[in-house]
Each structure stands twice: as structure tokens, then as C-alpha cells.
Amino acid sequence: MLKESKKTNVYIVEDDKNIREALRYNLIAQGFNVEFTGDGISAIETLLNKTFDIILLDLMLPGIDGLEICKRIRSENVDTPIIILTAKNNEIDKIVGLELGADDYVSKPFSMPELLARIKANLRRNLIKLEKTKSITRKQFTHLDTFIDLDKRIVKINDKNIFFRPKEFDLLYKLMSNPGKVFTREKLIEEIWGFQYFGDTRTVDVHIRWIREKIESDSERPQKILTVRGFGYKSKLE
């Protein structure tokens, strides 16, 4: 039995009844608390009103698909780890899901031992992330006219709140709290997305573009988040 099982609440979003029931049965057998749904609309409603430890999210759903669910809940700052369950062969769907804020994926058909290992790994990474967050002393600061509050996960420019998705915030905080330090794309993937991230490092570029559009006066000529060509990114020194 997994160490995390007694404390772990899992939410399954899967429209295939056979798969859903198999997941529910096996996870309960491992000691997890399980809730589930078969459609996207009820999934969003539940995820915006209840807290879970991990989400198992199918992409092909009636009503609203898994990618839209991922996008919506991340836009509402729900940062629960998400594992995508997909039977699709198109790699782009997996990459898009990861860029929208998912943490991992498992392709159908999958074995329960593999899925359980992935759940355990994502729970462990999330726990480490929370512990690191608690240990950081620089929780509130202003750099390059950008105010960041780590505890409240707030970003302000000229006293105006700027909305950031969870991964965008984490990436901005990493760069801004280490002014002048250059981070490779691979290092940012490791620290923000987790060492088992299966996407493309170009997702870092996408998130940097989104961040620049929010904090730069001219996102095409950035002055705060700088590109170090052939290497990665850094935040400008004062």
C-alpha cells in the first residue's frame, strides 16, 4: 500500500465507465479516497468548489473536453497536480495539455502499477514543492517595478493586480527572485514542471512569452525577462 494513500483524495474525470470503474476499484484498494465524474461540465463545477490531492483527467469527454477543463481550472489558480489520461496518438494533444498546466500524462492502455507510480511521483514532487515554498524567506518583494507576494500568489505592477496562471507565477517568481541568474530551459523544466516532465522545452518559451505580455511595456523588446541566446532566461538586474 502506498504511503500517501490514507491522506490522498483522487478525482477521476473519465467518461468510459469500464475504465472509470477499474480506476476507482484499484485506487480504493490502495487506500485512496476517490470521487469521479463522466462529463466535463460537472468536473469543472466540482474542481472549482472542492479540493483534491490529484486529478486523473481524460481528454475526450462529453460537454467540455479535458484540455478546456485543464485551461479553466488553471485560470482559476487551482494548482492540484493533473495527470492526463489519453488514448490519442497525436503527440500535440499531450504537449498542449502540459502547456495548459497539466503535470504528467499516461497513454491508454496503461497498467495500474504504472499509473500508481506516476501518482506517487507527482504527489512527492508536489510535497517537495510545498516544502520548498515554506522554506523560502523572500516571500514578498518588488523587482523591476513588479511586486510579487509568494504566499498570496499576487503580482502587481503600478498597484494593479495582474492575473497569472500557476505555472506562469512559479516561473516568474523563480526568475525574479534570482535577478541576473541565468536558468537553462532544462533547469526551469526540472524546477517548475518536475523532473519527469514529458513535453518539449519549448513550453518554457511559450510561458515566457505569456509572462512578457503581462509585465513588459513592449513584449517584443523585453526589459525585465531577458533571453540568453543558446542557453535560457534571466531577469534583468536593477
Image (tube, rainbow, N blue to C red):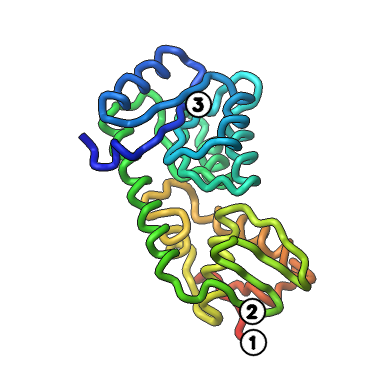
Disc on the earlier residue, 3 or 1: 3
The first of marks 1 and 2 along the sequence is 2
Looking at the picture, does residue 4 appear above or below residue 186? Answer: above
The answer to whether residue 118 is above or below residue 22 is below
Q: Gap between marks 1 and 2, in whole Å?
A: 7 Å
Amino acid identity at mark 3 = Val
Mark 3–mark 2 CB contact (< 8 Å): no
Up the image or down, 32 lies above or below 131; here it is above
Q: Which mark is residue 13?
A: 3
Identify the residue shown where x is 40% and y is 64%. Answer: 132
Residue at the extreme top of the image, as rendered: 18
Q: Mark 3, residues whose alpha carbon is within 10 Å: few (<14), some, or many (≥20)? A: many
Residue under label 2, please give it. Answer: 143
> Do the numbered discs 1 and 2 sit on residues whose CB atoms are within 8 Å?
yes
CA distance for labels 3 and 2: 40 Å
SS label for mark 1: loop
Amino acid residing under circle 1? Glu
Left or right: residue 212 compared with residue 180: right
Residue type at mark 2: give it: His
> Which image quarter holds the C terminus?
bottom right
Task: Note whether 90 is above or below 175 in the view shown.
Answer: above
- Residue drawn at point x = 29 percent, y = 42 percent: 4
* Camera-nearest label, 1 or 2: 2
| Residue for badge 1 | 238
Q: Position of residue 65 (x, y in %)?
A: 61, 27
Q: Secondary structure at mark 2?
A: strand
Report x, y in % for residue 72: 64, 39
Q: How far apart in space, not on screen, are marks 3 and 1 (Cα)? A: 46 Å
* Side of 179 relative to 222 (left or right): left
Give the quarter of the image for residue 83. Answer: top left
Numbered circles on residues, count:
3
